[in-house]
Image (spheres, rainbow, N blue to C red):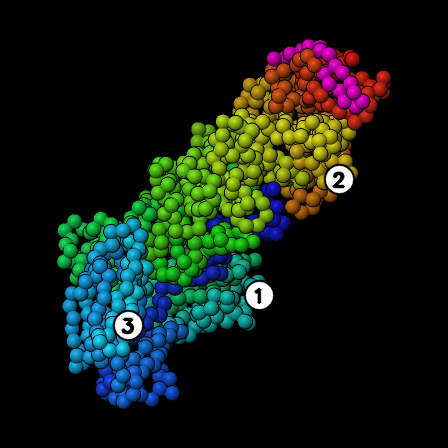
Amino acid sequence: MGNLLFLKNNDRCMKKIVSISLFFLISATIWLACKKEVQDDPFLKLQNTVSFAKEESSQRIPVTTNIKDWQVKVPTEVVWLTAKREKNDLVITVTKNEDASRTANIKVQGRGIVQEVKVQQLGLKAEIMLDKERINIEKITKEIELTVTSNVSYDLELPQWITEKSKKSLEGNVVHKYTFNVAQNTETSSRTGLIKVKTKGITPIEKRVFITQSAGYEGSDASSIEGDIKLKIHRGTTSSYQSGGEIDKSFDGDMTTIYHSNWSNGGANYFPITIEYFFETPQDVDYMMYYPRIEGSNGHFKQVEIQVATEANPSYVKLKDFDFKGNGKVTRVEFSPITKAKSFKLIIKSGYGNGQGFAAVAEMEFYKKNTGSFDPTSIFTDITCSELKPSVTDEQIQNISNPFYKSIAQYMKLGQYPSEFRIQNYRAWPNPDVYRERYRMQYSYSNLDNPTGIAVQEGEELVVFVGPTNGRQIQIKIQNLDLPGGDGFGNASYHPLYEGVNKFKAGKGGLIYLQYQTEDYQVAPQIKVHFATGKVNGYFDKTKHNDADWNRLINAATNKYFDVIGEKSHICFPVESYKTHTGSRGRALIEQFDKLVEQTHQFAGLTKERGKELPNRSYFQVMYKGFMYCTAYRTSYNATTMATLCNPDKMGAASDKTKTDVWGPAHEIGHAHQVAPVFMWKGMTECTVNMNSMNIQTAWGIPTRLERESMQGEGGYNNRYEKAYNLGIVLKRAHADIANNNQNKADVFCQLVPFWQLNLYFSKVKDDPEFSVKLYDKIRAVQQKSTINDGEYQVDFTKTVSDLTQTNLIPFFEKWGFYTPIDKEVDDYGTRRVVVTSNYANDIKQQITGAGYTTLTDRIEYICDTNWMYFKNKASVVKGSASKNGSQITTSGYQNVVAYEVYKANELIFVSNKNSFNIKQNVTNDIVIYAIAYNGERTQVTF
């Protein structure tokens, strides 16, 4: 039920994550594996249909592209047309057509982009030709154009919301260019219509154009936003390389191939390593992108000196020293604009890896910023394009040359731009790894604390405007949880963002999260970010949305998954699960998750009041493998559990607490807080974690699993306490060996009992509600041994609690087998031997005794959730009556009994904390039963 799959398969990976910050590591290991940021994508734009009358003629078609060597190809079997490139125009010529109308497709292509152009020509027979078959327009689009080429008379049939504005005749009244007025779509959803072109009075010919008009801003066409210009590296040299890892691998456009310095790095002069990159012709350069290797970490750059040689100064001049930190982060190095650079020299002074380290590069790229022909700050108040200047007029907006900016401005002017989620100020968060290390947690909390409410398709072009960053680093994670048979947390791509306009293709589809992590997160300024493309999916934030917002937002969700955030928690489950199981109670649901996390923090002593706050939220997500587990940055739940996790009542809101089912998520978040190996030695992974589940059930008034769950099917016991007493205390088993009969694997619930008993006694009987807090503080402070010895950690725990409580707890721990010698291989997400020796146990017991603590005489090995008040009140047993029937014992009227002990021939054979129990053998005359008081006083049960 815990981290079953993760630990077995990913121990080595986790060790790496522990030591390296996620914000930097993931950028290289996951994002690069999916898709790198591409800012120089080739583009090729021209009209896709060209129509001709039957006469011989030519047309010149403008081609908008950044591809210098684009070409045009005409099928060899098409002899009636020719096409050629003239500068940046496509010139098409057709011969006279003496037959029926004809059509051919030609191709314009370059750098992997192929665009087909349909060429059609009228003939001798009646025909109608249209330059479009489908038109998609926005809500506020005012005009559309359609060209009709025909050799017969025709009529137009238009939807009610489209009217003819003008008609322009071309080529001898054969070609007509129409402009139509389009009414604004005032509906809440998109609408469709048809433009029909029909012949008059002859054999009917009808051609149709399908029109779709959106109900609002969609930002679906970012083609007019041009990315920065990637500069081609002509050649490279290096002073050190390993065969197969030559320098050209660092500019071959393939992230899976790498440059790597020589593997033999023992020489005193191994560093510095020099790399040079040369351009074929001098280039203006604004920045450099360093992409580290996808797999492994050897060679990640650390200290590097960067030099440049220019046309004006052919000798290398130092630009700057730069610390890449060896962390594997994709890094952009900004330069003051460099004019006519001929080459760059990188002097790598240190790199990550064994010994002295190495140098490695997946790709190195140089860029010139593309400022574009339109300055958005002439219309908008800042570079985020988040607000129009007050003085901007409709006429100015209509005159904007860039259609992408024009569309944003139009919607803003009408007050209809969907800014709620597209434009937000994002706060900084700390790196959760810092707190995991500080509090010796097993797993870090969330690194997705800034959901954006934006969803994107894989390969979709994203345009993101970023406000002033003040030199701080931010990136987005695009995560797709829809991974059948898997966990979608790692099904993601990562993209760094920079101040100004960012354009790139989404490496993955899914929900977008902005990662802005910094040490000074409490005072770091917010960063305004505008997602101008992608679809609005929304999210629900308990701190700013109400119940009415929940219904509005969940019903408007466009993605399969939906984020719900509270003050302490963040859940991401399927939209349909919310609709089915949450209904209109979204706020109530996230409040329960907040309470769950808050109660966990209180139990572990990680609260703001104690100066040990966990600032990051706990992230709960759906997945499609296993059942439930906790791992790095999340707890994950199979889709089959959504009926529970999406139901506020089952998550603790129900007045009837027996109808709640919070154990699972309480257990999983408990894994994050386990302190290994001090309180999670081998065998305890699925045991001590349940201290938190018991804590949640107790704090919320839910009958605990130890008390209420029947064990009739597991040995015929009343509950888990009774089972633990008889398999542990009665059988005198070592704690690591408390197991079901004939089973080698320990029963983690039986093993849990003594830990929970300590909490019951000291928190409730001894009136120390912060006992668990102090215990966690103390175990966090215990120094780890140089060599892990699980048995010693188990024995050490007895001294830790004795020191904490200033109480000699040896009798209690002896009852539960903490000192009982054992040498056993324990399978707990991997096997290791647990060894407890008499010598080590005696040494620890002598230290406890030597401390002079008062020895505990209360029989707390029998304390439980329903009898702790007898210990607190120091209540004596009140005798009642009893009956026996075969092996069944039933008492009535007995009061203040903490346990019933059953003896045969003076040997303890059975213990129960219930008034009716089965001793597994007939009650014969040599069997004696005692009712035990809190202090061990015995009252014989008579029949």
- Please state which amino acid type lies under the numbered disc 1: Ser
Q: Which mark is residue 206?
A: 3
Residue 85 rendering spot, x and y as whole percentages: 29, 82
Q: Residues within 10 Å of mark 2 (few under 14, many from 20)?
A: few
How far apart, in angstroms, are the residues tagged by discs 1 and 2? 53 Å
How far apart, in angstroms, are the residues tagged by discs 3 and 2? 80 Å
> Circle 2 sits on which residue?
743
Q: Earlier in the sequence, mark 1 or mark 2?
A: 1
Quarter of the picture containing the N terminus is top right
Q: Is residue 478 above or below residue 924?
A: below
Residue at image coords 53%, 23%: 769
Q: Is residue 885 magenta?
A: yes
**Residue range highlighted in magenta:** 873-891
Q: Is residue 83 above or below residue 42?
A: below
Q: Residues within 10 Å of mark 3 (few under 14, many from 20)?
A: some
User: Which residue is at the front of the view, 582 or 197?
Assistant: 197
Which quadrant of the view contains residue 832? Answer: top right
> Circle 1 sits on which residue?
264
